[in-house]
Image (tube, rainbow, N blue to C red):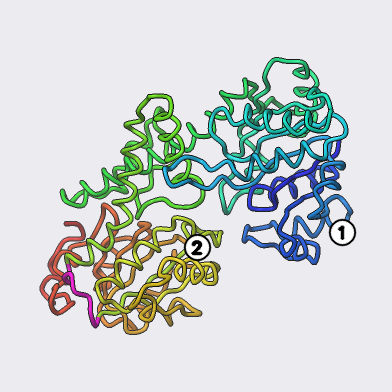
Amino acid sequence: MRVTVIGSGYVGLVTGACLSDLGFKVVCMDKDEDKIRALQEGGVPIFEPGLKALMARNRADGRIRFTSDASEAIDHGDILFIAVGTPPAEDGSADLGHVLSVAATIGRHLKSFKLVVNKSTVPVGTADKVRAALTHELLHRGMSPDVFDVVSNPEFLKEGAAIDDFMHPDRIVIGVDEGLHHARSQRMMGDLYASFNRHHSRTVWMDVRSAELTKYAANAMLAARISFMNEIANLADVLGADVDHIRRGIGADTRIGHSFLYAGSGYGGSCFPKDTQALVSTAKAYGQSMAVVSATEQVNERQKLILVERLVQRMGEDLTGRKIAIWGLAFKPNTDDMREAPSRVVIRQLLKRGAQVSAYDPVAGHEAMKALRLDFEGEENGLERFELFDTDMQALEGADALMVLTEWKNFHNPDFVSMKAVMRYPLILDGRNLYNPQALWELGIAYQGVGRRNGMALSFDPVQGDVTEASASRTPPHA
């Protein structure tokens, strides 16, 4: 079989590259001619560890190529993946404009049987709309609508680990409806993923609507775990408990497990925020409410402000004259994705209060500047007090406080002695709970994490921005 992937964004490129590495002849198509030209020349428009090398190897071996010619791409593939974006509309629902445009394009160029696979994250009922768009175009051309089938194959890729997720899946969800082509479609999808099922079956077969809902349900469940732990962390902060101890204690329960129990400054990215909103919107359209999912969203939006609140508690609302350093801008490590990144909310709030903001991210600097310019477009007194630096220590020079917003590995074990020496005041607000509160207390550094802190953080003088010698020597590690 040959494969075509329509949409050369994050999901499309990872899908195309990985399938080509399994030996399939793959064409990746996108209407953005500049993007296709860059891909043909060896460029990669996104940052994902290992993707550039994977694409280069398979391009050299002739298993993957790129085109903006829709007719060529559709003729090539026996299986046509739709992997275009589904951005949120103003009401929170998923905008299916790109998906249905691709479906119509396929209908205008279809000559023989093709299996159309929805890889994009789409609400329940999208496959029916794709079928309708294809059928409309085929009937307009005087062709029978029996020359295609539509199946659902949602992606479960984590940014920063997408290649490993694709090549070593814990499950492959495929939705195939009963109908004229059921057996053929199931066989083709089974053959496509046969490499992953040799030792034991990882494929979960179901109907299309169930597959569409499975993707949203999975992301909503993971998002809910994060928001739940963030609420526990905020309570722990007030009570003087340590959320890291709590995480280990409840994670040891096999019914709960350790995954997605890390408190922090909120989730972001292209999936959780968009998909929880779309799930709520879908339920509303059918007269249902999603109280847990709605609460998950609300908690997350508040959580993005938690470090700013902790800073204001210590320095006051007016941050004029204060310099706040930020380490990490991308919503998570190993990506340059700035979509819904907590750093964007934090930076806006700091600048609003008059602070000078100095930031460093090892990968996402360019994307961050693009996102922030968009955020502050048309506003006065916006980004002139924001500066991006080439190294973490440069950003830290003369800072009144450091906020850690992304858990890049090079932030895990910094030289705290050197950090303290270059900072104006030794205060760290750790939005990813990377550091040991007691170890920093012993070094004379005030530490405020999410749901954990040392005593020096409590005694930080909101006027002077300093810690008394007595508190540094006598206060216990935890509040």
Specify whether 205 is left or right of 383. Answer: right
What is the three-letter code of the residue carrying label 1? Ala
Query: Which residue is depicted at the point 44% across and 68% down?
Result: 372
Q: Tell which of 455 and 261 is nearer to you.
A: 261
Write down the region rendered in magenta: 314-321
In the picture, residue 285 is in which quadrant?
top left
Question: Could you say whether the residue bearing mark 2 is in a helix, strand or loop?
Answer: helix
What secondary structure do most residues of the magenta stretch adopt? loop
* Image quarter of the C terminus: bottom left
Q: Residue 321: percent from the left, percent from the top?
A: 24, 83
Residue in the picture at 38% in, 81% down? 384
Q: Tags 2 and 1 in contact by the CB under 8 Å rule? A: no
Residue at the disc numbered 1: 60
Q: Is residue 64 magenta?
A: no
Q: Nearer the viewer, residue 8 or 93?
A: 93
Q: Is residue 272 above or below residue 379?
A: above
Q: Is residue 145 above or below residue 379?
A: above
Say above or below: 296 vs 394: above
N-terminal of the pair, mark 2 or mark 1, is 1
Element at label 1: helix
Task: Answer with left or right where residue 316 lies relative to residue 370.
Answer: left
Front residue of 286/61: it is 286
In the figure, is residue 437 to the left or right of 97?
left
- Residue occupied by mark 2: 409
Residue 318 inside the magenta-drawn segment? yes
Q: Amino acid at mark 2?
A: Lys
